[in-house]
Image (spheres, helix red, strand yellow):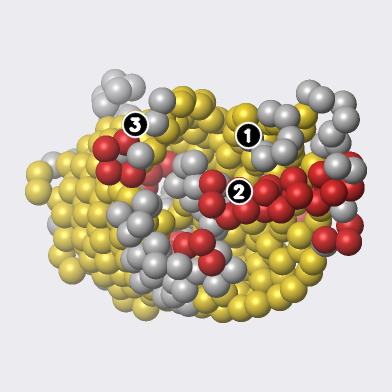
Amino acid sequence: MSKAVLCSAAILVLLLSCEAGAQSIYGMNYIGEVVHMGSSRQQGLGYSAVAVQDTSNSVTANPASTADLNMVTLTFQQVLSASRVYFLEDISKQTRYTVPSFTVSFPVREGLVVTAGYRARYIGRADFAYSIDIEGAPPGFQNYKLDSNLFMIPVIAAWKPFNTLRVAGEAQFNLGSVIDKVNVWFDDLNYINIDSKRRRSYTGISWGAAVLWEAHPRLWLGCNIDGAVDYLVEEVIENTVSELDTTFTYDYALPLAFDIGFAANPYGRWWLSASYWMRPAADPVGYSQLEGNVGDEKHIGFGIERRASREGHVFNQMPVRLGFYMDTWHIQFPGGQEVTSMFLTAGSAIPMGNRPGAIDFTLEFGRTGSKEENFVEENIFRFGLSFSVAEPWSKRKTEKH
C-alpha cells in the first residue's frame, strides 16, 4: 500500500476518533466548561455571590455592584488548576491555566460607573497521548490536544438611582475558538505521520442586565441575566493531505442564562449567601456526535463569610470565606447520563489597611463525574487569585495639570 493511500486511510480513522473518542474528560470536543463570574472573593463563596455587595473589585458576580465603586478600579482574576483523570484503568494528570479575566471601572459621577474588560465564558484544555490500532498498519500512537476559549469583551453601565438599588446594562462582544489537534505517528519508517487540525471560530453580539437590591440592611437580593448569543461559526479543517481540507460556516445559538440569589447577615460580621444559575440546553450544531446528549446547565452555590474588621490583630482584619457548589454540565455522558461537579471552597484576603484595593485568594477541591455513572472521573484542585488597584479619578486629573 502506498504512503498516500495509508495517509488518506489514517486521516479517515483520525477524524472519526476525534468525533467519538475525544470526550475523555468532560467539555472536550465541545465548547468547554462554563466559567462562573466573579473575583476570588466570589469564588471563595462557592460562586453564590450574585447578591453580595462588592466595593473593592470590578470583576464581580453581579455587574450592578460596580455602581458602588467611587475610584478608578482595575481588577485581575486568575485561576490555575491541576487534576487527575480516571478512565477505566487509565490515569492522566492535567494542568490548566487561562488568560486572566480583567476589567477596569471608571466612575462618571457618584453612582454611575462604566466598566469594560475581558471575561471568559467557556474554557477547555486537554492533552492526551495513547496507542491506537489501525487495520492493515502497524501499531501507532495518537496525541489529542484541545484548546477551547469562548470569551467576551463586556461594556457595562452601572447606576445607583437610590441608596438601596443598583442596576446595570451590558453590551457583550463575543469571540473565541475551539481548536482540536490530532497527530498520529508510527515507529515504522515506512509509514508517514498524520496531522489534523480543526478550528472553529466564534463571533457574536449579546446583552446583559443586572439588579442588586438592599431589601433590608441585613438582606440583599440579586439577579443577573446573560442574554442569548447568536454565534457565527467558521470551521476550518486542515490535514496532511491538503486535498481533504474543508472550510464552511454555520450558526450556533447559546441560550439566555439567569442567576438569582440572596445574601443575609444573621449575626455580627457573618454573612450567608446562596444563588441558583441556569442556562437551557443548546442545540449542538457542529457537534453531531452530541445529539441527544446535551442538557440544561445548572449551578447551585452556598457561601459563608466572616467579613474583615479594620481593628484588632492581623487575622481579625482578614476575612474568612467558605463555600460549596454543585454544577450540572451541558454534556451528558454516556448516552444521556448527567455529569455533575461538586466543590468545596475556602478563601481569604490580604489586609490592605486604609489603602484602596484588594488581594483575594481561594482554594477549591472537588470532583467532576464519577467512574460508576460516567466511566470518567476527574479530581480537581484549583487556586484562584485576584487583585484590585484603585485610585481617585480626581487625583489623577490633578497630577496631569
Tag 2 secondary structure: helix
Which residue occupies the foreground of this view, 41 or 313?
41
Q: Quadrant of the C terminus?
A: bottom right
Residue under pointer 3: 365
Q: Which mark is residue 132?
A: 1
Q: CA distance from mark 3 to mark 2?
A: 32 Å
Q: Nearer the viewer, mark 3 or mark 2?
A: 2
Q: Residue 329: x percent and y percent?
A: 37, 55
Characterize the local packing of mark 2: few (<14), some (14-19) or many (20 or more) Cα atoms within 10 angstroms.
some
Position of residue 384 measured from the top left corner of the image (x, y, whole percent): 46, 36
Q: What amino acid is at disc 3? A: Phe
Q: Counting residues from the N terminus, which is met first, the one under dot 3 or under dot 2?
A: 2
Q: As drawn, is 252 to the left or to the right of 224?
A: right
* Kind of residue at badge 2: Ser
> Residue under circle 2?
17
Residue depth check, mark 3 versus mark 1: number of the one nearer the observer: 1
Compare residues 165 and 9 and report the one nearer the observer.
Answer: 9
* Quadrant hosting residue 131: top right
> Residue 396, can we see it?
no
